Amino acid sequence: MEHLKDFELADDVALLAQRRSDMQSKLDDLADRSLTAGPKINVNKTKSLDINTVNPSSFTVAGQAVESIESFQYLGSQMASDGGTKIYIGARIKNTRTAFASLRNIWKNNQISRRTKTRIFNSNVKSVLLYASETWCVSVENTQGLQVFINTCLRYIIRAWWPRNRISNAEPQRRCHQKPMGTKVEVYRPHSAQGRKRNLQASVRLEPSNWNRIRGRPRGSWRRSLNKEIKKVDESLTWQQVKAMAGNRPRWRSFTTALRTTRGAQE
């Protein structure tokens, strides 16, 4: 069992714990060691987030109460109390909408070919939307939200506005050579298993099967969704075999190619 205890980058520290008593102990240790080394924890910038719990937590740092919140942004990622990615994907769509609007003059220019516009869209807009998508556990609802946004952008590019141009959503995708968003996100996801950094490997190997959770059907996770994708290529593959394969570039390239081919055959 791998235990992921914290994320650290410069002065940004995120502590993780399964029990409230463990979290308070970690906060006390961090405060004591910080004073010894010199830095001091800013309590006003310190927040606590309960994931999939009913009773709110209360923590203190140096006798001061820590504010409890429902979501917060950490290093570009949006963390939510339900443990899902809906809020984060919504934030990515908002940022991408701004990027798309900033290129309005290009989309309206009749002197620029559709092929060139599509290439600009993929490099300057779609890349913003799919940033860090390899770590997403995407639900049907989130995938539909991504697809609706992409369809709106494509209709603007080909100048097919409703209700004057009543065409199916598949038509703008065909004209701009775009694949469905669900397939696009799934293509990126397996590459997370190839991470060579120690902290990334620990987060990928983390299996929270024995964590306490609320009653009901378990939520989908990145690990479960990736296992589902792997089984499409070879049902006999185990997680350990996939990790070993990720260290061999030629084998990994062959595996991901087979995965994309399998998806293409199913569409």
Image (cartoon, grey):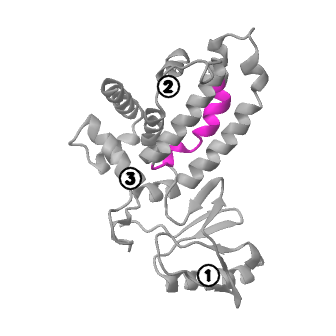
Q: Which residues are magenta?
A: 121-137
Q: Residue at x 47, y 81 (%)?
A: 19
Q: Residue at x 46, y 46 (%)?
A: 141
Callout 1 touching callout 2 (CB < 8 Å): no
Cα gap from disc 1 to disc 3, whole angstroms: 29 Å
> Residue 176 or 16: which is nearer the viewer?
176
Q: Give the residue at the far left of this rendering.
A: 236
Quadrant for the C terminus, please.
top left
> Residue 21 or 145: which is nearer the viewer?
145
Q: Earlier in the sequence, mark 1 or mark 2?
A: 1
Where does the image place residue 194, in percent across and percent down from the top left?
45, 43
Q: Identify residue for label 3.
A: 223
Q: Measured along the vertical axis of the image, is residue 18 above or below residue 180?
A: below
**What crowding class fits label 3: few (fewer than 14 Cα within 10 Å), some (14-19), or many (20 or more)?**
many
| Tag nearer the camera, 1 or 3 | 3
**Mark linked to residue 27:** 1
Q: Measured along the vertical axis of the image, is residue 49 above or below residue 178?
A: below
| Tag nearer the camera, 3 or 2 | 2
**Mark linked to residue 169:** 2
Quadrant for the N terminus, please.
bottom left
Where does the image place residue 143, in percent across and percent down from the top left?
47, 41
> Residue 73 or 216: which is nearer the viewer?
216
